Image (cartoon, helix red, strand yellow):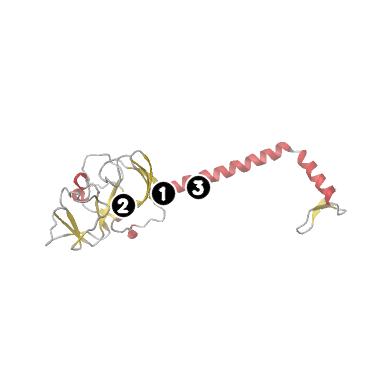
């Protein structure tokens, strides 16, 4: 006996008996329990596969976890701290002064350490001028206000070949980078500004700090 369905109603048999149709449906399902289980397992497998694909895609194209290899960004970031770096739809034209970014290892970097991506802070943008005097950095003639640094943080090496009378001008499409641990940071003072196209992404969250879970938005 065949069954039909009225719009929005329960299944009925050809004689219009919904109870008879329901009995036949349950009987048919009972005759194929293995097929139903296989179909359910296949559905879960597809769902897990989609979830895994999305997770891998997010890691590759949306964000990435970076571990800090050195003390050059202390006290903001310590050795083995972990940050989440935003990569999706990232455009280096949107980078601002003070941002913490990850970029590929500069070819001119001859400082000791692993040849890996670096994490530094943007202190001067394309076209801006920069020089240092004492422990202070000046951008476009104004002292750079750096609330992220400890009070009276020593500068360490000065910005080379740059004075108040003849500041260094950052070339178009490039950024001047420095570590927050100024005395120990190997940065643009040693290997010059970096190209914007070398920036991998921007740090958005610190989630592991001083060997324990932490949470800080950049």
Count the marks: 3
Q: Residues within 10 Å of mark 1 (few under 14, many from 20)?
A: some
Q: CA distance from mark 2 to mark 3?
A: 27 Å
State the residue in front, 80 or 199: 80
The answer to which of 182 and 216 lies nearer the viewer is: 216
Marks 2 and 3, the one that precedes in the sequence:
3
Q: Nearer the viewer, mark 2 or mark 1?
A: 2
Residue 216 lies, with reference to residue 6, above or below; the image says above
Mark 2 or mark 3, whichever is nearer to me: 2
Q: Quadrant of residue 23?
A: top right
Graded by Cα atoms within 10 Å as few (under 14), some (14 to 19) or many (20 or more), the crowding at tag 3 reads few
For the residues labelled 3 and 1, the Cα–Cα distance comes to 12 Å
Q: Residue at x 25, y 44 (%)?
A: 72
Q: Which mark is residue 177?
A: none
Nearest to N terminus: mark 3 or mark 1: 3
Q: Which residue is mark 2?
A: 100
Residue placed at 41% from the left, 49% from the top?
Answer: 63
- Looking at the image, do the residues carrying marks 2 and 3 touch, with CB atoms under 8 Å apart? no
Asked whether, in this view, residue 184 is left or right of residue 46, the answer is left
Disc number for residue 54: 3
- The Cα atoms of the two marked residues, 2 and 1, are separated by 15 Å
Q: Given contact means CB atoms under 8 Å apart, are the residues at marks 2 and 1 in contact?
A: no
Q: Residues within 10 Å of mark 2 (few under 14, many from 20)?
A: many
Q: Label 1: state its secondary structure.
A: strand
Residue named by callout 1 = 63
- SS of the residue under disc 3: helix
Whole-percent x and y of residue 135? Answer: 16, 52
Q: Earlier in the sequence, mark 2 or mark 1?
A: 1
Q: Residue furthest right?
A: 15
Q: Position of residue 38 (x, y in %)?
A: 67, 38
Horizontal placement of 22 versus 93: left or right? right
């Amino acid at each position: 006996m065949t069954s039909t369905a009225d719009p929005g109603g329960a299944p009925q048999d050809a004689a219009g008996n919904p109870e008879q149709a329901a009995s036949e449906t349950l009987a048919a399902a009972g005759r194929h329990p293995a097929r139903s289980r296989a179909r359910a397992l296949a559905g879960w497998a597809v769902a897990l596969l989609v979830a895994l694909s999305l997770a891998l895609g997010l890691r590759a194209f949306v964000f990435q976890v970076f571990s800090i290899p050195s003390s050059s960004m202390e006290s903001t970031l310590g050795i083995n701290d972990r940050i989440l770096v935003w990569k999706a739809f990232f455009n280096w034209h949107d980078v601002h002064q003070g941002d913490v970014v990850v970029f590929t290892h500069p070819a001119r970097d001859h400082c000791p350490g692993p040849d890996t991506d670096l994490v530094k802070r943007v202190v001067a943008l394309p076209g801006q001028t920069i020089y240092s005097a004492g422990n202070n950095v000046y951008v476009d003639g104004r002292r750079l206000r750096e609330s992220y640094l400890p009070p009276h943080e020593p500068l360490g090496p000065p910005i080379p070949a740059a004075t108040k009378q003849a500041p260094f001008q950052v070339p178009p499409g490039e950024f001047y980078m420095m570590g927050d641990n100024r005395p120990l940071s190997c940065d643009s003072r040693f290997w010059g500004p970096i190209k914007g196209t070398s920036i991998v992404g921007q740090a958005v969250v610190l989630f592991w700090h001083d060997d324990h879970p932490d949470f800080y938005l950049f």
